Image (spheres, coloured by chain):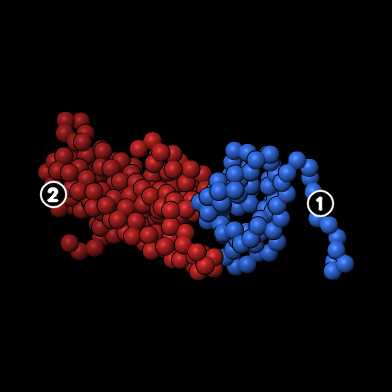
Chain colours: A blue, B red
């Protein structure tokens, strides 16, 4: 799960299609978090068996976006959900 | 070459690129058509003896206005699109050189400049064509009148096209644009010189 900053143009559809086109990516979800005058903050969720992180980064940057942070990563043979802690 | 053509066609699919290109095309085409009326009437009134000479003068005007259309829009759009990119870069806090957004803007600029140059060329060359037929069958007076007619028809088409995209009455809009051609012809006749 990535936190991205992108210009308004290209739109989220183009963004989603381009990232989904990366080899190893099975599916993509983009949610608009915040819209500013010139930019948009979006949450990009990518699923796939072997997600090529560098290739996704390159695609995002080529589209004019910037990866703020990678907020969640799940890997391994089984799907591990985030655990609740007393602090939560 | 092929990739450049693809980029231009992709740019043409964008509404904002089409809208700006349309404005440049019509605006400069309007200039071109009115210039051709001026050239035609001015040549006839000043006694240019043959149609080929008028045609050559017209082509000279088309080259001038066409180059002006491409060159000025190239520079205008370079500055405008650069300013847009800088604004986004400032908001993004990143360099957007060599990104798709920068390539898109470059493609848009090329389409804008091309359409801007095509407008006056169409607006001048077509009205000048009747002068090629001056000679045995058509007199200078006939070819001048036909040339004005062609220019007015082009202006009418521009007006009708604008009416079509803005859902106005195409006959009224076309006539309003076409009237400009007749006004220029009359002004050429009544003004001294």
Q: Is residue B119 left or right of residue B164?
A: left
Name which residue lies at 30% across and 41% down.
B126
Nearer to us: label 1 or label 2? 1
Residue B131, placed above or below residue B168: above
User: Where residue B27 sits: x, y (%)?
Assistant: 39, 55
Q: How many marks?
A: 2
Question: Does residue B33 appear in this view?
Answer: no
Name, please, the residue furthest toward the right: A86
Give the letter of the chain under mark 2.
B
Q: Determine whether the residue tagged by mark 2 lies in a helix, strand or loop.
A: loop
Front-most of residues A72 and B4? A72
Where residue B37 is drawn, which disc sits there?
none
Name which residue lies at 44% across and 51% down.
B103
User: Where residue A4 sits: x, y (%)?
Assistant: 62, 59
Circles 1 and 2 on the same subunit? no
Name which residue lies at 70% across and 61% down.
A33
The answer to which image quadrant residue B139 occupies is top left
Where residue B47 is drawn, which disc sits there?
2
Name which residue lies at 20% across and 42% down.
B55
Circle 2 packing at 10 Å, graded few (<14), some (14-19), many (20+), is few
Residue B135, placed above or below residue B55: above
Front-most of residues A1 and B81? A1
- Mark 1 and mark 2: span between their CA atoms? 90 Å
Q: Determine whether the residue tagged by mark 1 lies in a helix, strand or loop.
A: loop
State the residue position of label 1: A81
Residue B10, placed above or below residue B97: above
The C terminus of chain A lies in which quarter of the figure? Answer: bottom right
């Amino acid at each position: 799960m990535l936190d991205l900053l992108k210009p308004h143009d290209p739109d989220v559809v183009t963004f989603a299609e381009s990232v989904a086109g990366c080899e190893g990516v099975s599916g993509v979800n983009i949610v608009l978090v915040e819209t500013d005058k010139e930019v948009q903050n979006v949450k990009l969720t990518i699923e796939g068996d072997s997600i090529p992180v560098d290739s996704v980064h390159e695609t995002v940057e080529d589209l004019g976006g910037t990866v703020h942070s990678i907020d969640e990563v799940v890997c391994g043979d089984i799907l591990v959900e985030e655990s609740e802690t007393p602090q939560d | 070459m092929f990739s450049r053509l693809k980029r231009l066609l992709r740019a043409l699919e964008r509404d904002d690129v089409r809208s700006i290109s349309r404005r440049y095309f019509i605006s400069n085409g309007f200039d071109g058509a009115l210039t051709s009326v001026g050239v035609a009437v001015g040549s006839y009134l000043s006694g240019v003896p043959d149609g080929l000479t008028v045609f050559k003068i017209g082509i000279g005007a088309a080259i001038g206005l066409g180059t002006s259309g491409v060159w000025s829009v190239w520079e205008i759009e370079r500055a405008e699109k650069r300013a847009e990119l800088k604004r986004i870069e400032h908001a993004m806090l990143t360099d957007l050189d060599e990104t798709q957004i920068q390539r898109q803007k470059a493609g848009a600029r090329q389409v804008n400049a091309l359409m801007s140059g095509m407008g006056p060329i169409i607006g001048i060359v077509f009205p000048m064509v009747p002068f090629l037929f001056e000679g045995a069958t058509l007199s200078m007076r006939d070819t001048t009148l036909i040339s004005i007619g062609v220019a007015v028809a082009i202006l009418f088409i521009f007006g009708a096209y604008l009416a079509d995209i803005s859902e106005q009455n195409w006959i009224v809009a076309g006539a309003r644009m076409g009237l400009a051609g007749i006004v220029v012809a009359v002004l050429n006749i009544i003004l001294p010189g």
